[in-house]
Image (spheres, helix red, strand yellow):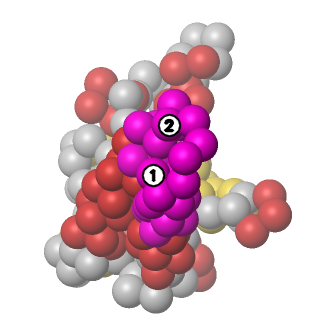
Amino acid sequence: MSAPVEIRNSASSNTFAIIAPFIGAAVAGVLAFRALSSDTARGPVFLLILFAVGCLGWGLFKASSGFDSGVQVTLDSRGFRDRRAGDVLVPWETVRSAGLVHGNHGGPTLVNFELTGKLPEAIQYSNANALNLMLPGGGNTVHMEMSSLDISEGDMMAAIRRLAPHVKVGR
């Protein structure tokens, strides 16, 4: 039996996603302060303050999840489990193929797992698989975002080939 592959968040890939909300909060806060200190209309000040507080909250949430060093994805001889998307075991017997998809213009890299049947309900409603809800028939592909993980594309594909030799693996 092959040893399981435990994949964690990559520390370097989340930096901008963590910093960006704090920059938005700072800009909105400065604009709100300037609007309060002047004698101009006070209408948008409440919205600016609300936006700044929302950005601050989002930044804190991203910071807490971005520095999470726990296991995010597990691949073993039984199947794969993505803690970020439902945390449900998807058995290899239900996987027909796996392939890499690179996002346009530097977007995230995804591993798409085509299943033989319907998606498990916990995965079906996850963020990464929201597109399946809009497709006719619901789709049968599990999308796993891997740009933020500490594994290379080649290592991910090699692990799938080793753990599930019957799964067709492509690029």
Q: Quick check: 90 above or below 161?
A: above
Instruction: Using the rendered view, name the quadrant where residue 138 is placed.
Output: top right
Looking at this view, name the residue that lies furthest to the top.
136
Asked if the residue at tag 2 contacts the one at tag 1, i.e. Cβ–Cβ closer than 8 Å, the answer is yes
- Could you say where residue 127 lies in the image, as x and y percent from the top left? 43, 40
Q: Is residue 130 visible?
A: yes
Magenta part of the chain: 24-49
10 Å neighbourhood of mark 1: few (<14), some, or many (≥20)?
some
Q: Which residue is mark 2?
A: 42
Looking at this view, name the residue that lies furthest to the bottom.
12
- Could you say where residue 97 lies in the image, as x and y percent from the top left? 57, 49
Quadrant, the N terminus: bottom left
Q: Which mark is residue 36?
A: 1
Residue drawn 81% across the image and 64% down it:
105
Q: Amino acid at mark 2?
A: Arg
Return the residue nearer the eye: 101 or 24.
24
**How many marks on residues?**
2
10 Å neighbourhood of mark 2: few (<14), some, or many (≥20)?
few
Instruction: Using the rendered view, name the quadrant where residue 2 is placed.
Output: bottom left
Looking at this view, name the residue that lies furthest to the right.
105
- Type of secondary structure dominating the magenta stretch: helix
Residue drawn 69% across the image and 62% down it:
107
Quadrant, the C terminus: bottom right
Whether 65 is among the magenta residues is no
